[in-house]
Image (spheres, grey):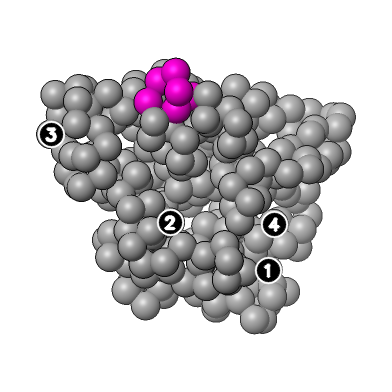
């Protein structure tokens, strides 16, 4: 439990946040920011399945940080996707499934790590922007450091390699049909261990948004698609195939991450926050 002074601080910050945002996410954002201000955490991560509300929470954390007097910047892992041309080259040279954005191996991880370091220092930092509708990079944005709090949000933030190799059995139709020899899933796992783990190690704390399961991810992904122009939307069949690219790591995270995340946010089927589990004392 947080003490009375911190509880009052959370209430003050929460009251200043966007009233149109879900109240449970407003409360969560305020609670996280107050705890991080007290602990001195400077780089934090938010991971969880597609549609879990990471972007919504990130925006609220940015506003909560401002209310708490912290210069806060939210960095989206999605913005560090490789462009279409780079992914096509990776698909040609490594495996065709690398053309689809999402899994480890489709991000510019070196640039991400450099950005997370640079944002804590004085000076301009150029952050890329990725348009999911166009499925490609667009104009970048320059921000001026240093920031007091840097928040990295992305679906696989905090995921650990599972030891997947080329003899690991397929778990869905995509893996059976498009990766029969296991090359793609073994390479994804190897990159998660080699390239992504050092980035996660930079984080002072990890927040995990625990989705109810893959059915919720598919449904919430469909809701996200509804916000896109009609000509850019994926239909239900395409959404199902797309989510299968993420299925192995998403299921692994649901099993592994709650036991080691600093904060586990249990989401109900209706997308509300069912519970918030703190791994250790907020005063630690």
Q: Nearer the viewer, residue 269 or 188?
A: 188
Q: CA distance from mark 4 to mark 2?
A: 20 Å
Whether tag 1 and tag 2 are in contact, CB under 8 A, the answer is: no
In the image, the segment drawn in magenta is 90-95
Residue 263 visible at all = no
Horizontal side, residue 34 vs residue 66: left or right: left
Q: Residue at x 15, y 29 (%)?
A: 168
Q: Is residue 133 left or right of residue 193?
A: right
Of circles 4 and 1, which is in front? 4
Classify residue 272 as left or right of residue 260. Answer: right
Q: Which residue is mark 1?
A: 13
Give the CA separation, mark 2 to mark 3.
24 Å
Q: Is 240 rendered above or below residue 112?
A: below
Is 91 one of the magenta-colored residues?
A: yes
Give the secondary structure at mark 4.
helix
Residue 282 picture location, percent across and down = 48, 51
Q: Residue at x 64, y 81 (%)?
A: 20
* Cα separation between marks 4 and 1: 11 Å
Look at mark 3 in the image and give the residue it sits on: 169
| Local crowd size for mark 3, using a 10 Å CA cut-off: few (<14), some (14–19), many (≥20) | some
Q: Earlier in the sequence, mark 4 or mark 3?
A: 4
Q: Is residue 60 visible?
A: yes
- For the residues labelled 4 and 3, the Cα–Cα distance comes to 42 Å
Which circle marks residue 62 in the picture?
Answer: 4
Q: Earlier in the sequence, mark 4 or mark 2?
A: 2
Residue that numbered label 2 is attached to: 50
Q: Nearer the viewer, mark 4 or mark 2?
A: 2
Q: CA distance from mark 1 to mark 2?
A: 27 Å
Counting residues from the start of the chain, the first of labels 1 and 2 encountered is: 1
Please tell me whether mark 3 sits on a helix, a strand or a loop: loop
Residue 215 placement (x, y as % from top left): 28, 65
């Amino acid at each position: 439990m947080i003490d009375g002074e911190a509880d009052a601080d959370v209430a003050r910050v929460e009251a200043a946040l966007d009233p149109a945002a879900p109240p449970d996410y407003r409360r969560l954002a305020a609670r996280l920011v107050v705890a991080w201000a007290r602990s001195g955490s400077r780089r934090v991560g938010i991971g969880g399945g597609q549609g879990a509300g990471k972007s919504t929470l990130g925006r609220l954390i940015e506003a909560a940080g401002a209310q708490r007097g912290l210069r806060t910047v939210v960095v989206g892992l999605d913005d560090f996707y490789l462009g279409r041309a780079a992914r096509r080259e990776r698909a040609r040279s490594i495996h065709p499934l690398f053309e689809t954005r999402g899994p480890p191996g489709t991000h510019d991880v070196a640039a991400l790590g450099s950005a997370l370091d640079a944002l804590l220092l004085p000076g301009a930092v150029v952050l890329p922007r990725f348009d999911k509708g166009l499925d490609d990079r667009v104009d970048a944005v320059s921000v001026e450091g240093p920031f007091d709090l840097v928040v990295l949000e992305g679906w696989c933030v905090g995921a650990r390699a599972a030891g997947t190799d080329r003899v690991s059995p397929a778990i869905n139709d995509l893996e059976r049909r498009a990766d029969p020899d296991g090359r793609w899933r073994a390479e994804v796992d190897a990159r998660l261990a080699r390239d992504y783990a050092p980035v996660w190690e930079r984080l002072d704390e990890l927040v995990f948004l625990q989705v109810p399961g893959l059915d919720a991810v598919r449904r919430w992904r469909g809701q996200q698609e509804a916000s896109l122009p009609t000509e850019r939307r994926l239909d239900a069949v395409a959404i199902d195939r797309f989510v299968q690219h993420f299925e192995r790591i998403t299921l692994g995270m649901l099993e592994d991450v709650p036991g080691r995340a600093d904060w586990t946010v249990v989401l109900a089927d209706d997308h509300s926050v069912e519970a918030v589990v703190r791994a250790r004392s907020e005063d630690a």
